[in-house]
């Protein structure tokens, strides 16, 4: 059903001129683009798991929101003038994102200034469109409003946010700089991700976890006893966080990749955080342990992060995630046979999500290798020759 009931024939309101409408959406585009970009950069450095989760979920919401905003700009004004670049006034606010020196400072700029200003402009926008001639914009705006409002509330529960006066009365009315684009800066390379202060990080991680848990084929060992499942799922929760952090950094460190790549990375970041959450709940509810009970290590993360984007996508998504599919399915079957239905179900869902994650590696790895499947296979062969039996690179990447 349309927003205005079909039996209503009140006069149409004039509403916004199409150009002004496209300009408003262009301003939202610029804000969302940079919020996503910098949130991806800071996500690995946020120590608290629940704050990291919230940040990742918001990145995914905003990436989907930006898809709709881009689409609406394209529909309204399908030429190169829109979205252009942000006005100097907006650019000065967006520059604040680049000066943040911690996840908490980043959160202050995003949730104390940018999102409230965005929300106010979106709400004003709904009063400016005619709901019959421009129902399409109205539907997009309502969705964006609901999400931005929720993000601001959720952030207030995770960080100390001081609400700031909006830097402009109406963000949507700012002019855009046509036929220009704005480059994005990138944070320095990560040393290692951050974890909750109660988690112990050691060079070797949990000594309980042996290689036979991570190999494929006859030698693969499925953890079935309560003690080994505690250690295994604790290690897996950390591995999910590392996966989310790798994807977030892939997006942040390669801002010039096509927009669909960033949407795919946002989805996978959220998926991996959801997986971590599944393990957190499983540990507390079924396994009698908690996040932080055992040591963790960043050896594997660092061995993959050391590669460029192509290497990361081929080694992590195209190899590690691809081989994990076999192990998830094997684990599921063994646990089902033992009557552990709930633990088996977890592996079945991990397996289902792994399919698009592997595809991300193949699709974007091939893209980076000139769209040539033969080049992808050749590079994969070369990279896999440098892996140990658990799939971890034995040496850092060769300088090229
Ligand atoms: Fe996962
Ligand atoms: Fe995985
Ligand atoms: Fe995955």
Image (cartoon, grey):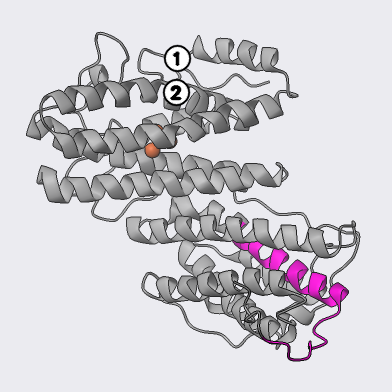
Q: Position of residue 283 (x, y in %)?
A: 17, 46
Q: Earlier in the sequence, mark 2 or mark 1?
A: 2
- The boundaries of the magenta stretch are 8-36
Q: Position of residue 59 (x, y in %)?
A: 53, 57
SS for callout 1: loop
Q: Which residue is mark 2?
A: 322
Foreground pick, 74 / 36: 74
In the rendered structure, find residue 387 and report the number of the disc placed on it. 1
Where on the picture, by quarter, is residue 368?
top right
SS for callout 2: helix
In the rendered structure, the answer to whether residue 302 lies left or right of residue 116 reads: left
Does residue 254 appear in this view?
no
| Real-space Cα separation, disc 2 to disc 1, in angstroms | 14 Å
Rendered-image quadrant of the C terminus: top right
Does residue 162 appear in this view?
yes
Whether tag 2 and tag 1 are in contact, CB under 8 A, the answer is no
Quadrant containing ligand 2 reads top left
Where on the picture, by quarter, is residue 320?
top left
Q: Position of residue 289 (x, y in %)?
A: 13, 46
Main secondary structure type of the part rendered in magenta? helix
Where on the picture, by quarter, is residue 257?
top right
Q: Residue furthest bottom?
A: 10
Which residue sits at x=73%, y=58%? 70
> Is residue 36 shown above or below 205?
below
In the rendered structure, the answer to whether residue 81 lies left or right of residue 141 reads: right
How many residues crowd around disc 2 within 10 Å: few (fewer than 14), some, or many (20 or more)? many
Which residue sits at x=18%, y=22%? 334
Which residue sits at x=44%, y=23%? 322
């Amino acid at each position: 059903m349309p927003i205005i009931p079909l039996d209503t024939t009140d006069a149409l309101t004039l509403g916004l001129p199409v150009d002004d409408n496209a300009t408003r959406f262009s301003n939202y585009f610029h804000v969302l683009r940079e919020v996503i970009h910098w949130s991806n950069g800071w996500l690995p450095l946020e120590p608290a798991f629940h704050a990291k989760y919230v940040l990742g979920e918001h990145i995914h919401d905003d990436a989907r929101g930006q898809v709709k905003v881009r689409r609406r700009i394209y529909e309204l004004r399908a030429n190169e003038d829109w979205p252009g670049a942000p006005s100097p006034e907006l650019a000065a606010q967006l520059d604040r994102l680049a000066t943040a020196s911690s996840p908490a400072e980043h959160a202050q700029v995003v949730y104390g200034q940018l999102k409230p200003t965005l929300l106010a402009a979106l709400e004003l926008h709904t009063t400016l469109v005619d709901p019959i001639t421009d129902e399409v914009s109205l539907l997009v705006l309502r969705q964006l409003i609901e999400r931005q409002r929720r993000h601001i509330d959720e952030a207030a529960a995770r960080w100390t946010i001081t609400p700031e006066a909006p830097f402009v009365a109406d963000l949507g009315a700012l002019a855009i700089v046509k036929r220009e684009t704005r480059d994005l800066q990138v944070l320095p390379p990560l040393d290692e991700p951050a974890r909750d202060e109660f988690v112990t990080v050691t060079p070797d991680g949990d000594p309980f976890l042996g290689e036979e848990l991570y190999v494929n084929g006859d030698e693969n060992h499925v953890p079935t006893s309560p003690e080994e499942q505690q250690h295994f799922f604790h290690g897996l929760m950390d591995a999910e966080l590392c996966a989310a952090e790798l994807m977030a950094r892939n997006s942040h460190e390669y801002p010039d990749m096509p927009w669909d790549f960033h949407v795919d990375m946002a989805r996978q970041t959220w998926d991996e955080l959801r997986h971590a959450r599944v393990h957190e709940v499983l540990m507390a509810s079924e396994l009698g342990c908690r996040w932080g009970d055992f040591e963790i290590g960043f050896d594997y993360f660092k061995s993959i992060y050391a590669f460029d984007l192509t290497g990361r996508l081929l080694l992590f998504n195209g190899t590690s995630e691809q081989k994990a599919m076999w192990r998830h399915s094997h684990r599921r079957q063994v646990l089902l046979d033992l009557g552990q239905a709930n633990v088996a179900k977890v592996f079945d869902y991990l397996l289902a999500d792994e399919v698009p994650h592997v595809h991300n590696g193949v699709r974007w790895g091939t893209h980076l290798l000139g769209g040539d499947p033969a080049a992808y296979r050749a590079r994969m062969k070369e990279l896999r020759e440098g892996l140990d039996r658990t799939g971890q690179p034995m040496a850092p990447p060769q300088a090229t």
